[in-house]
Image (spheres, helix red, strand yellow):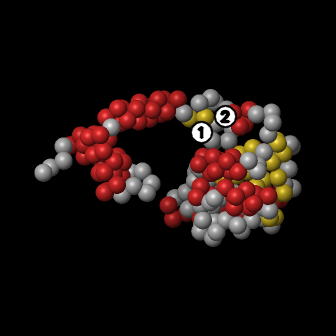
Amino acid sequence: MKTPQALESVIDSLKKLPGVGPKAAQRMAFHLMQHDKEGAQNIAEALINALGRVRHCERCNNFSEQPVCDLCQSMKRDDSVICVVEMPSDVQSIEQTQSFKGHYFVLLGRLSPLDGVGPKEIGLDRLIARASEDVVKEVIVATNFTNEGEATAHYISEKLIPLGLTVTRLSRGVPAGGEIEYVDIGTLAQSIIERKSAD
């Protein structure tokens, strides 16, 4: 039996999500169409709503419904510290630890010359400009402990240390090859507290 084209389109779309293979995508699509049409409608409406309202913060690149996100606007945050992460999901993970009270800068990626991703593509010029503000004293580089994440951290350190900034890196409680998003809250909190100098 041939799958209807409209349903095949749903399956193909779901397969594009991280960690979702062909079988899982098919199971999800079939479940939504057969058992949860209301849920499917809610998902569709929520996605359309988010696509129309959510953007990247003009200051830090985190997700926001306003031009500048709530974290950047907060007067309760420590303006002297910026934590650099790869993705908005990393901000969420670090915020859940309740161990960091500074500001963020989201790169929206990591250096990967083989994929054509250089300093310009991840906004390192904007990071350097922001870190150069007089109030900033420390930059915590919280990129993932993958080869690309380490290369990105090294590049950032080389650019920021000459500016007289303290540049630190999360401690090694985060496993080599590990991604911030998947590290348990306790380990992540400890790695923020025990961060090390990046020089």
Q: Nearer the viewer, residue 68 or 32?
A: 32
Q: Is residue 70 above or below residue 198?
A: above
Residue 45 is drawn in which quadrant? top left
Q: Amino acid at mark 2?
A: Cys
The location of residue 78, given as percent across then percent down, is 82, 42
Q: Is residue 131 left or right of residue 57?
A: right
- Quarter holding the C terminus is bottom right
Spot occupied by residue 57 in the image (x, y as percentages of width and height) = 63, 36
Question: Residue beneath label 2, please?
Answer: 69
| Residue 190 vs residue 34, the one in the foreground | 34
Q: Pinpoint residue 171: horizontal percent, then vertical percent.
A: 74, 65
The residue depicted at 78 percent of the width and 53 percent of the height is 139
Is the residue marked by circle 2 packed among few (<14), some (14-19), or many (20+) residues within 10 Å?
Answer: some
Determine which residue is flagged by label 1.
Answer: 63
Quadrant location of residue 198? Answer: bottom right
Camera-side residue of 168 and 165: 168
Residue at horizontal 41%, vertical 36%? Answer: 43
Circle 1/circle 2 CB separation < 8 Å: yes
Q: Report which quarter residue 21 is drawn in.
A: bottom left
The mark tally for this picture is 2
